[in-house]
Amino acid sequence: MAEENAEEYDKAAETSDPRESVDVFFSAFNQRKESVEKGLASALEKKDTLEQTFIKEHLDSLALELSAMEKLVADSSYFLPAYDVRSSQTAVLGLKEELASASTELLPKKKFSFRNKAAKKQPISVVAADSTTGGLRDGTHNIERNWETQNPRGASSESNSASSPSKEGSVAVQAANNRECIQGKQNSVFVRDSQVLGAELTLSDLKNCRVYLKGRLTTLYIHRLRNCQIFAGPVTGSVFIDDVEGSTLVLASHQIRIHSTKATDFYLRVRSRPIVEYTTNVRFAPYAFSYPGLQEDLIASNLAEETGLWEKVDDFRWLRAAQSPNWSSLPVEERIPVEDGTDIQGLGCDES
């Protein structure tokens, strides 16, 4: 039934007016949402009677259904009202958290390390609060916040570890379990090597930190950053940013959504127009990060082409035909040089 509704949505999106497409979208989206909710409830209710093989297959199907929901929202964001996009994304994030929690409960738990085994622990490098690194600027005023997003601080500590999958294990369930999280840190450098690919990552509540993400991710969530620098390899899905101030973010992704952010510079490689909302005094420039293997990662993520969309920003809170005053292109003379992440030393994600 959910697949039929999704097909109906695809056809209607091409032939119907936006109001009809919104109705069809929610019909398909809610069908999938109900299917995932019932599937999770059934698995937890019968956990003592189900075999491990069946549980893996069942969670795999739910993870794929969630991926379909996320794609449905992304594909529909061009005609959906901004509030509906946000509420749908929040619903998907909530279900992903429930799936990760259920996977941890239903599947055997083993410690999962994200460090490069060949690397030795390096001393922590410190970024001072009064850093003068190019691109960092202080914000000067508060902005309105009414976007309800996931709260990484409320997540279980088990979200930092995952089940070690067997060879026949599900790739989709592995991705759901492998969500990394760096949160609540100050004056530190974090380096994520490219050994573990396809994971989701959350960066939250960081102050005066530098984060280097060398390798591919499926989704990146960024919340509550102050005076930070983030350098990321390609994200094959979306980057969701909320409440960032006085920072520099270098990102490559198919979709980037920025909310409640101010006094921050973005260096982007994107395949769709960046979206800002409740955001002021942000500036945009081309992607500026390098590391060994980056070009191969960009090609594999379909992000090798420079589209020029980094300066085609949509401000959802500015409906006039004139240029939005909330964002601008970063002058060439003020841009940071390309950051070389080859020999950067810092903490691994599993040490956060």
Image (spheres, grey):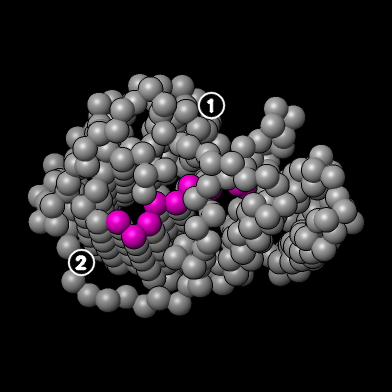
* Residue located 60% across and 69% down the image: 87
The kind of secondary structure element at disc 2 is loop
Q: Which amino acid, by three-letter code, is at mark 2?
A: Gly
Mark 1 packing: few (<14 Cα in 10 Å), some, or many (20+)?
Answer: few
* Residue located 53% across and 61% down the image: 156
* Residue located 34% across and 60% down the image: 184
Expressed as whole percent of the image width and height from the top left, the position of residue 100 reads 63, 54
Query: Is residue 38 shown left or right of residue 213?
Result: right
- In the image, residue 205 lies in the stretch drawn in magenta: no
- Number of numbered labels in the structure image: 2
- In the image, residue 183 lies in the stretch drawn in magenta: yes
| Residue named by callout 1 | 300
Expressed as whole percent of the image width and height from the top left, the position of residue 151 reads 48, 67
- Numbered range of the magenta stretch: 176-185
* Residue located 25% across and 34% down the image: 122
Q: Which amino acid, by three-letter code, is at mark 1?
A: Ala
Query: Is residue 266 shown left or right of residue 187?
Result: right
Q: Is residue 94 visible?
A: yes
| Residue named by callout 2 | 139
Expressed as whole percent of the image width and height from the top left, the position of residue 154 reads 49, 68
Mark 2 or 1 closer to N-term?
2
